Image: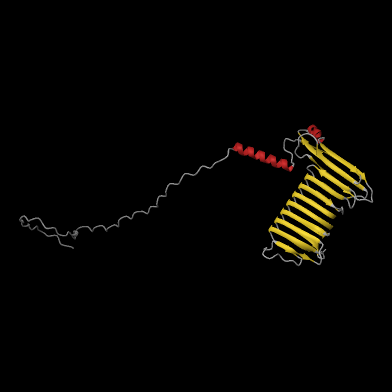
Amino acid sequence: MLFRRPTRVVPQPVRAPQPPPRSVPTFEPVAIRFLDDPPPAPPQPPPSPKAQAPTPPPAAPPKKRREFPIGTLAFLAVIGGGLMLHRAGVALPMAKDAVSEEISRSFTISESRHPKVIVEMLNGSVDVARGEAGKVECVVTRRTTGQDRQDAEADLKNISIAMTREGDTITVIARRIGGQPRNNAGASARLRVPEGTLVRLNTDNGGLKVQDVEGPVDAHTTNGTVEVKGATGNVALGSSNGAIHVEATDAVVSADCSNGAIDFRGSLAAGNSSFHTSNGKVSLKLPASLAFKVDAKTSNGKISTDFELAPSRGSKGRSLVGAVGEDPKVSLKVRTSNGAIRLQEDGD
């Protein structure tokens, strides 16, 4: 509301005292501005409170990880590495010098008879191949290590090599006869034998290989691969840690390994043949014309075949039992715990 300012003051009459007013509702006063008063400033909106992010709760102190002392870890690393190298036959740094020696011998036998060769090596491989008729040639390499060359040469005499003949049987044996076993100490052998020789091999740590002998083979190793090509008759092979590969003709085969695959190619003679591995696949390549009975099982894996056989009902492809051809004389047993089994027709 706007009013003009009066030019004179009108005296107000004196009022008699009034009794206390009754309680009446109060009203907000209305501001009055005269024409010559400066205009009031526009009302400012009250400042809005700033949004404040909620204060996160204090983080829990991190847990202190349990750590091994550095000295303990270094000690364990040295001990573990030493054990691994010792098992592998690798020389430790303390062995500064390595020496070896070849020992060879030749035996003449009757060409009309098939000899028998027995080989037992110490921490080394054996390689047998077909040689001349009527002759058995043997080469054995013994080796060891030492603090110096003189120490190594002295220890070399503790590895005994014996090559003997009794009738048509040739025996080659390597053994330690004295001193403490040393890293990378042992003996390996190479032999050349006539066709049809019966071969019997055994070694602790090393591979076994027989090529084109065309005779029975008995070969076993603790750690290593067994390879046989060109065998016939009874074939018995074994390895604790290593694969087995076989090629044979008219053979009765027994192949057994703990850790490794088994491969066979060739023909089987009448009788019971078996192939067993704990961890690995088994692959058999057989002539399409071969008549045989089969009993194959795997715990973890699949069985597949080119022959007219089907997995047993409810086996989920892990069992195969049946016969191929008429009146089979060959019995085949196949087992693996962890691996596939494959039966193939050999078209070659």
- The residue located at (73%, 60%) in the rendering is 296
Residue at the far top: name it.
150
Q: Classify the position of the C terminus by image quarter.
A: bottom right
Residue 159 appears in the figure: yes
- The residue located at (78%, 47%) in the rendering is 221
Q: Is residue 19 left or right of residue 192?
A: left
Measured along the vertical axis of the image, is residue 250 above or below residue 107?
Answer: below
> Which of the pair 242/100 is nearer the observer?
242
- The residue located at (72%, 40%) in the rendering is 86
| Count of marks overlaid on the render | 0
Indicate the quadrant where residue 274 lies.
Answer: bottom right
Q: How is the image coloured?
A: secondary structure
Q: Position of residue 157 (x, y in %)?
A: 82, 35
Q: Classify the position of the N terminus by image quarter.
A: bottom left
> Which of the pair 329/76 is nearer the observer?
329
Indicate the quadrant where residue 101 lies.
Answer: top right
Q: Position of residue 345 (x, y in %)?
A: 79, 64
Q: Is residue 244 left or right of residue 338?
A: right
Residue 33 appears in the figure: no
Q: Position of residue 20 (x, y in %)?
A: 9, 55
Q: Position of residue 246 (x, y in %)?
A: 80, 55
- The residue located at (74%, 55%) in the rendering is 276
Q: Is residue 221 left or right of residue 57?
A: right
